Image (tube, helix red, strand yellow):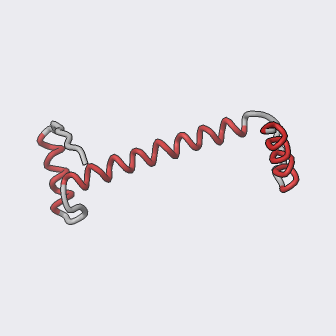
């Protein structure tokens, strides 16, 4: 683990310490790690949603079935040889 020093206004420091004191978290570090993890997950979800939207807007949908996958495998094998 790495150490990061942060500066907080007194009101935010008091809020963080209150969260720990209420028993939700074992330490200030644990609380901040949880906030960062939640932000990371939110950004990943936003990125996935952007990719899904791009996929939906990329053109006409095709059916992906066993036959489609078999054709992809066949094409890949031919390109490797």
Left or right of 62, for residue 6 = left
Question: How many numbered callouts?
Answer: 0
The quadrant in which the C terminus is found is: top right
> Which residue is depicted at the point 19% across and 53% down?
28
Residue positioned 21% across, 52% down in the render: 29
The residue positioned 15% from the left and 54% from the top of the image is 17
| Residue that protrudes farthest toward the left in the picture | 10
Work out which residue is located at the far bottom of the displayed protein and give it. 23
Tell which of 66 and 43 is nearer to you: 66
Residue 71 image position (x, y, % from top left): 86, 47
Q: Quadrant of residue 58?
A: top right
Q: Is residue 77 above or below residue 67?
A: above
**Viewed as shown, does residue 43 lie left or right of 21?**
right
Residue 70: x percent and y percent?
A: 85, 51
Above or below for 46 versus 66: above
Q: Position of residue 77 (x, y in %)?
A: 81, 44
Task: Please identify the quarter of the rendering in which residue 4 is found.
Answer: top left
Q: Position of residue 39 (x, y in %)?
A: 39, 45
Q: Which quadrant would residue 72 be assigned to in this image?
A: top right
Decide: is 30 above or below 49: below
């Amino acid at each position: 683990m790495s150490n990061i020093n942060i500066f907080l206004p007194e009101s935010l420091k008091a809020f963080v310490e209150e969260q720990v004191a209420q028993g939700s978290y074992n330490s200030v570090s644990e609380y901040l790690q949880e906030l960062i993890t939640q932000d990371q997950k939110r950004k990943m979800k936003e990125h996935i949603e952007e990719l899904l939207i791009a996929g939906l807007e990329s053109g006409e949908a095709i059916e992906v079935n066993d036959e489609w996958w078999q054709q992809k495998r066949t094409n890949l094998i031919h390109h490797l040889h």
